[in-house]
Amino acid sequence: MFELLLRPEVQHYIRQHAHVDEKAWLLKTREVFGIAPRLMAQQMAGLRKAFNKLPSWASSENIVYPPALNLEQTSSEATARFKASVVTSSGGHQRGVDLTCGWGVDSFFLSEPFDAWTCVERDPDLLAMAQHNHHQLGRSNIVYENTSAEAWLATHKARCDWIFIDPSRRQQGNQKVVSLAACEPDVVRLQDTWLNTAPNVLIKTSPLLDIRQALRELAHVKDVFVLAVDNECKELLFHQVRGFVGEATIHACHVSGKTCKETSRFSFALSDEQSAMITEGAPLRFLFEPNAAILKAGAFRQVGLRWGVQKLHPNTHLYTAADAIPLFPGRTFEILESVKPDKSLASRLPNGQANILLRNYPLTVEALKKKTGVVEGGDLFLLGARHTGGVSLWLCRRL
């Protein structure tokens, strides 16, 4: 099904037009090299997105890209490589299975250390794309089965070392869902079945999922990975280990999108977070905002205790200290002065500009801009927050 797309002149055309507006291109194009314009536009848009999302794939020849929705749902190279590191660091690597292969990005990276890997996908077109791309990228240890996760589990009794599953998080009409019960396949119902098949299971879920609720529904979870890339929370990973009894460890992990390397990890137990006591205090010289993974993980007290900083307010997830902390896992701001949110503020800023960050503050960003005349931009920051002494707006610089 890909023969026409793989012709050298077609691949050259796709690369030459990867950065054009494909919607405008479609309006004035009827056919290219005998290929339907919509399929060509799909390839052009896919390659353009892959330059940032999957750079190693984008740099390879003859990769076939799926429809926009499938590409949107697929893992980035940074998150796929992280999952591969989780699997590589524990358990055996003789045989593994991806029960929801999709376009095959996760499987490509996960399969590397295994003697044999199986891709299960019920959409034949996506499975064919995955198989083609894997072979194009040099992976030869994968077999492909066009079936559902439920059917595969029901008919395959052979044991394996790892199962990976990324359940669909969209209902009819492309409405996103964030509960395990609304996912397909039903991971809660199937978990006993796959834990009888493999001692290790890695479940990928939406970053919007409630971690505590998921832990009440999933058995034998040893580790939970909250994964953020460039300070944006991307996904949650639940590692089930057959027979594990005990409390799961939560790992708030931050990865660089550019290098695909993990830059920080903050690990804790929910019971420790619940019992921890943290001091609250007035703002000092430096303010600290934990990265997105820590905030999603809910380590609000633990991060303060671990780094010896005070919390500004019970409901404000900003911390303060008299001295800078170079390795703090997040952003650090130095307070230059406290300012008033009035029309005089813009005239005191270079070009009337500042980046605006508001945390538990009574005004929205737009309302503050209207009240002060400040335009977003520049090198300085206006940081507004509620603290134990009231509400303040500070002019800051970011370290």
Image (cartoon, rainbow, N blue to C red):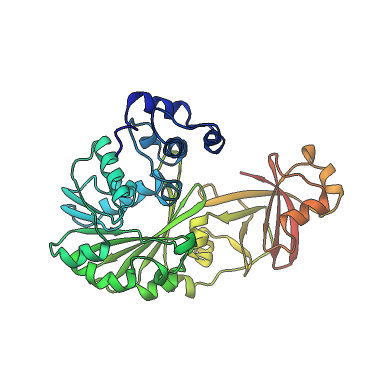
Point 48% across, 29% down: residue: 17
Q: Position of residue 190 (x, y in %)?
A: 28, 70
With respect to residue 13, does 228 lie above or below?
below
For the residue pair 98 and 172, the one nearer the viewer reads as 172
Res. 199 in view: no
The foreground one among 68 and 27 is 27
Q: Position of residue 25 (x, y in %)?
A: 53, 33
Q: Quadrant of the C terminus?
A: top right
Query: Left or right: where does residue 26 sit relative to residue 155?
Result: right
Q: Is residue 326 left or right of residue 357?
A: left
* Image position of 125 (left or right of 252): left
Residue 350, visible in the rendered structure: yes
Q: Residue at x 44, y 42 (%)?
A: 53
Seen as rendered, the residue at the extreme left is 158
Q: Could you say which quadrant of the image residue 188 lies in?
A: bottom left
Across and down, in percent, residue 287 comes to 63, 54
Depicted 70 relative to depicted 281: above or below? above
Q: In this orientation, which residue lies closer to the viewer: 391 or 19? A: 19
**Quadrant in which the N terminus is drawn:** top left
- The tally of labels here is 0
Residue at x-position 21% and y-position 57%: 91
Q: Position of residue 342 (x, y in %)?
A: 85, 53
